Image (spheres, grey):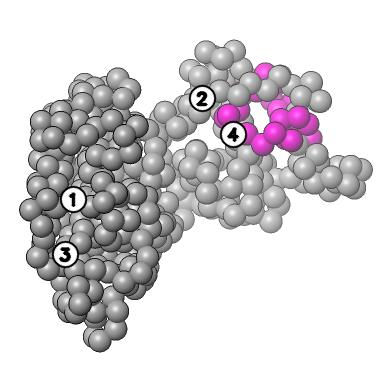
Amino acid sequence: MKQTNNFPDVTAALAKNRCEAYLLVADSSNADMYFATKFRAGDPFCYIQTRNARDMMLISDMEKGRAQKESRIEEIVPLSFCDYKKRLKETADPGRAYGECIGQLLQKEGVRHVAVPRDFPVYTAQVLKEMGFTVNPIQSPLRKLREVKEKGEVNLIRQVQQANEEAMQAAIETIRTAEIEDNKLFLEGQPLTASRVRRIIEHCLLDHDCRAHGTIVACGKGAADPHWHGEGQLLASEPIVIDIFPQHKMHHYCGDMTRTVTRGETTEQLQQMYDAVLAAQEKALGMLKPGVAANDVHQAVCDEFEERGYFTDAEKGEGYIHSTGHGVGLEVHEAPSIGLREIPLQPGNIITIEPGLYYPQIGGIRLEDLVLITEHGYENLNTFEKEFVV
């Protein structure tokens, strides 16, 4: 089905950097490439946008028909247009032949000065330089455009987040129904492990055409490492951090949420940590609206923790050791960051609010919601409960 969306205009960035075209070479796992073209391909292809707001794709002849049907781009140029096979025979170097094809297309458009993202393929850049082009690596203007989501993008992220909540429900219900024996969790007579809960999460996501990326089911003291995936049998009366961040397999948009639960009786120390994290999250959520600076939201979380006696200096290696959130869209971590930088929030930003506390001798507690900044405040895209003891 043909994909449509508003034109991703980068001409202002071209003018600022005195370039005549913006060039991408990547496959569709690159979020900027998919955003610009709405085309899914496992092999790298080329996207060009010129200073007069004209864009095109250079793609293999095999993919031309599909690109014409599925991508956002009207002008699809096959490699045969640039004599790719002839160049390949002459050079015996696929990378050089492809780079020369890009160069030929740029020459046809009257382009000599090219802007590229900072992660542009080095060899392709070298070929273009040898052909006489100026190649200027710049901060991605597409990444900046991706910060503000349109209504259609918001709805796609809602879809993924709903699948995320169902997966979280399945995971927590599994833990809730587990039996406790010798302070360990068992399900139907078998040890309940982190990997078993992950499989339950992943199967649920697959039912909604989503794939999991590094799902965290981290129990006990190891959960003091915020990105430890977790392993081994789950324990009773220990915090279990469940962080799920799926991506839809077709439209590529992501979701993100975290809950922390414990099965069995908890300690006063863990309950106080949980209450502090919940209070910090609620304080941050209460501040969200257009124009509020991201660093002010982060500082409010730090203030709440410090008032309760918890560290907020990451160099100490314990307490609150990360930023308060990040953007979510075609990537699970994208701009804007809710941390130390003074970035004003805008309507259409979709961000996480995810404070946490981490102590190596105790474990970790984290809560994460996904929220949309609206014209007058925010909308929480999560409806899932926050209950520590299950």
Q: Is residue 378 visible?
A: no
Query: Which of the two labelled residues, at mark 2 and mark 4, occupies the earlier sequence position?
Result: 4
Q: Nearer the viewer, mark 2 or mark 3?
A: 3
Which quadrant would residue 167 be assigned to in this image?
bottom left
Q: Determine which of the numbered discs, if any, sits on residue 139 in the image.
A: 2
Q: x and y percent of residue 11 in the render?
A: 51, 21
Q: x and y percent of residue 244 in the render?
A: 31, 56
Q: Nearer the viewer, residue 352 or 76?
A: 352
Q: Determine which of the numbered discs, if any, sits on residue 119 in the image.
A: 4
Secondary structure beneath label 2:
loop
Q: Is residue 99 left or right of residue 152?
A: right
* View extreme (bottom): residue: 189
Quadrant in which the C terminus is drawn: bottom left
Secondary structure beneath label 3:
loop
Residues at marks 4 and 1, CA–CA distance in whole angstroms: 34 Å
Q: Are the residues tagged 2 and 1 within 8 Å (C-beta)? A: no
Check residue 105 for magenta coloring.
Answer: yes
Q: Nearer the viewer, residue 300 or 348?
A: 300
Label 4 crowd (10 A; few <14 / some 14-19 / many >=20): few
Q: Nearer the viewer, residue 358 or 48?
A: 358
Residues at marks 2 and 3, CA–CA distance in whole angstroms: 47 Å
Which quadrant would residue 102 be assigned to in this image?
top right
Q: Would you name the residue on which mark 3 appears?
A: 237
Which quadrant would residue 204 be assigned to in this image?
bottom left
Query: Which of the two labelled residues, at mark 3 and mark 1, occupies the earlier sequence position?
Result: 3
Residue type, numbered disc 3? Ser
Secondary structure beneath label 4:
loop
Q: Would you name the residue on which mark 1 appears?
A: 382
Residue type, numbered disc 1? Asn
Check residue 343 for magenta coloring.
Answer: no
